[in-house]
Image: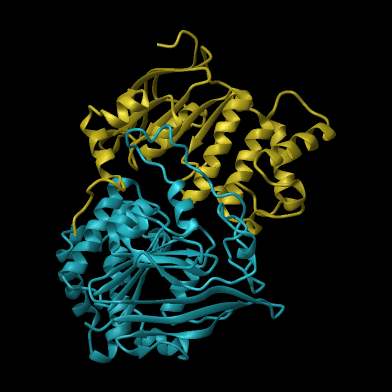
Chain colours: A yellow, B cyan
């Protein structure tokens, strides 16, 4: 157990509905995440991984249990987002179509407690764009619909480079892009981690991706964390039947999959 | 055995508002036999989806055919009106499984009504009534081993993603088309659901509900298991075309090699192997490119690559568009 956890969850549950229609999206999970760790939460669709991410982000208040960020409850969302930021699956639904990208990147600074001057903001946006290999002139005056999916996903990452949060929650950041762009985005995420010493929580259904990036993997199924551990242990020597099934279903090049 | 689906030197272009031609697909040729699945892979924007429209013969402005021919059972799909294509070709001979199942189903109607529309629209002249079409539907959905009554009487929003995608596949193949074109049918699903959907596709092929299929995706490991042959597309051209084993285990074109290098997998020893992204972006297709299209990003490019355009040639039993590949 990490001594000074950045997130600590104790018997956290998140339920929706009641009576017969009660859905236990997250059911009695307990974990600690240390500062600077990269954690992957892996599971099939509907296993509750995104709900757990939203609890971490302060968008949902857990139904029961204790969820602490640096030892405190999340009471003020704006204060929380000063430290914790996220990247979502579909970049097109994350930007407002009516404003230019640059304006929205600058707008994002409103969430920070330390107010910067206009020049500082411009500088940081420029540097963030360069960090994701986009020259600022390229997107000058451009609107979100003028960019491709891969470029948009990079804009979301540029926002993180600019804001420099302490924690990044990445909810399926690569599931909408092709394999080349995925390798690219992973590079940038690793760069973020190296430059800013960030804690990253990945939410994904791709155990191959989780195996590659993370320090620890949590496998979720029906709201519970069924297995957790270092990647080599979880991905290569799985114990839980859920994990075995999950790994078995991935089409690997050197493995039998479905016979025709 | 003669080929069911033939494509000969197909080139397609878009016409922009200012009269500029954008050559989205250039010189694609292949032919498919009964029971064959062809996989097409390539990065976003390489012309995969444009090719799909061309293969259906559906030329809706601004898309126009430049040259070439597409034939289903010897019948050409070129130079026909969209109305003609819709009433005689789509669903009956060539059918398509769209990318996002949720966007393809009308949210205000039940699955059975959406499907019955397809039958009634295409078989009206044969005198199929709406009531008869429901019976046809039940028969077909029972064949899939699905929970027929519940799914047919649900609205799309009440179904899971996998059920939705399987319903869409069911609807697309209702009229036993010769050819089914699947444009990323599983990229929005998780791995377990993906497996179920692929199993269903194999099952339909075995039961002769359709005879050939084109499967478009960017997941090469998936294609290795699904496809018999794979074509790798780059900037509108096929750069390599061969059997699945040849392409995945022994790629020869530099672009295919680079694509394989960007793959991730949870196999022993793979953690240290870093996936390598291909630097740079594909060329703009608004101009006609004289040299090799991949030369700008190719790790093994030579100075004269940018001067000569590359022709398809045979290397180790497959077609490769690179004169230095060996």
**Quarter of the picture holding the N terminus of chain A:** top left
- Res A260 → quadrant: bottom left
| Residue found 40% across the figure and 32% down from its top | B271
**In the rendered view, would you say B319 is above or below A201?**
below
- Asked if residue B54 shows in the view, the reply is yes
Q: In x, y percent, where is residue B46?
A: 52, 64
**In the rendered view, would you say B117 is above or below A255?**
below
Q: Which residue is more in the foreground, B315 or A193?
A: B315
- Asked if residue B112 shows in the view, the reply is no
**In the rendered view, would you say B237 is above or below B190?**
below
Q: In x, y percent, where is residue B155?
A: 32, 59
**In the rendered view, would you say B81 is above or below A245?**
below
Task: Tell me: A61 left or right of B221.
Answer: right
Task: Tell me: B261 left or right of B132.
Answer: right
| Residue found 37% across the figure and 41% down from its top | B265
| Residue found 48% across the figure and 51% down from its top | B258
Q: In x, y percent, where is residue B11?
A: 52, 79
Q: In x, y percent, where is residue B320?
A: 44, 67
- Res A217 → quadrant: top left
């Amino acid at each position: 157990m990490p001594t000074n956890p950045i997130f600590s969850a104790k018997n956290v549950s998140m339920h929706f509905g009641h009576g017969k229609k009660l859905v236990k999206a997250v059911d009695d999970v307990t974990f600690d995440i240390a500062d600077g760790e990269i954690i992957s939460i892996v599971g099939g669709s509907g296993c509750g991984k995104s709900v757990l991410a939203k609890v971490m982000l302060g968008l949902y208040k857990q139904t029961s249990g204790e969820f602490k960020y640096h030892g405190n409850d999340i009471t003020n969302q704006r204060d929380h987002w000063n430290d914790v930021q996220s990247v979502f699956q579909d970049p097109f639904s994350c930007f407002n179509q009516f404003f230019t990208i640059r304006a929205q990147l600058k707008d994002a600074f409103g969430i920070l407690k330390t107010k910067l001057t206009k020049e500082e903001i411009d500088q940081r946006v420029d540097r963030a764009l360069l960090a994701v290999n986009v020259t600022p002139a390229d997107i000058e005056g451009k609107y979100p619909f003028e960019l491709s999916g891969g470029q948009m996903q990079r804009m979301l990452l540029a926002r993180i480079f600019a804001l420099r949060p302490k924690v990044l929650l990445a909810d399926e950041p690569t599931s909408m892009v092709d394999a080349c762009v995925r390798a690219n985005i992973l590079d940038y995420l690793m760069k973020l981690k190296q430059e800013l010493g960030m804690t990253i929580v990945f939410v994904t259904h791709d155990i191959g991706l989780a195996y590659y990036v993370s320090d620890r993997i949590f496998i979720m199924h029906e709201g519970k964390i069924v297995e957790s551990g270092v990647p080599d242990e979880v991905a290569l020597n799985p114990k839980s039947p859920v994990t075995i099934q999950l790994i078995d279903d991935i089409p690997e090049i050197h493995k039998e999959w479905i016979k025709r | 055995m003669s080929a069911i689906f033939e494509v000969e030197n197909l080139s397609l272009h878009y016409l922009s508002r200012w009269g500029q031609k954008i050559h989205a697909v250039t010189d694609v040729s292949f032919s498919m036999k009964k029971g064959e699945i062809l996989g097409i892979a390539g990065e976003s924007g390489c012309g995969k989806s444009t090719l799909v429209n061309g293969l259906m013969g559906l030329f809706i402005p601004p898309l126009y055919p430049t040259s070439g021919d597409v034939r289903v059972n010897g019948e050409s799909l070129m130079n026909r009106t969209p109305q003609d294509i819709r009433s005689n070709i789509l669903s009956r001979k060539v059918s398509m499984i769209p990318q996002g199942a949720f966007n393809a189903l009308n949210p205000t109607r039940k699955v059975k009504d959406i499907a019955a529309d397809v039958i009634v629209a295409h078989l009206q002249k044969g005198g199929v009534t709406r009531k008869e079409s429901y019976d046809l539907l039940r028969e077909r959905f029972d064949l899939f081993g699905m929970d027929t009554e519940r799914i047919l009487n649900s609205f799309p929003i009440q179904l899971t993603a996998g059920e939705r995608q399987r319903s869409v596949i069911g609807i697309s193949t209702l009229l036993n088309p010769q050819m089914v074109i699947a444009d990323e049918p599983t990229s929005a699903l998780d791995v377990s659901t993906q497996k179920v959907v692929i199993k269903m596709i194999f099952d339909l092929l075995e039961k002769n509900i359709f005879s050939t299929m084109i499967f478009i995706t960017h997941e090469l490991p998936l294609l290795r298991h699904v496809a018999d042959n794979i074509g790798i597309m780059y900037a509108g051209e096929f750069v390599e075309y061969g059997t699945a084993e040849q392409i995945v285990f022994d790629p020869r074109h530099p672009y295919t090699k680079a694509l394989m290098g960007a793959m991730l997998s949870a196999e022993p020893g793979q953690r240290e192997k870093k996936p390598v992204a291909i630097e740079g972006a594909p060329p703009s297709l608004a101009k006609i490119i004289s040299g090799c299209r991949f030369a700008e990003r190719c790790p093994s490019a030579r100075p004269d690559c940018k001067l000569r355009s590359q022709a398809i040639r045979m290397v180790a039993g497959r077609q490769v568009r690179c004169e230095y590949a060996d």
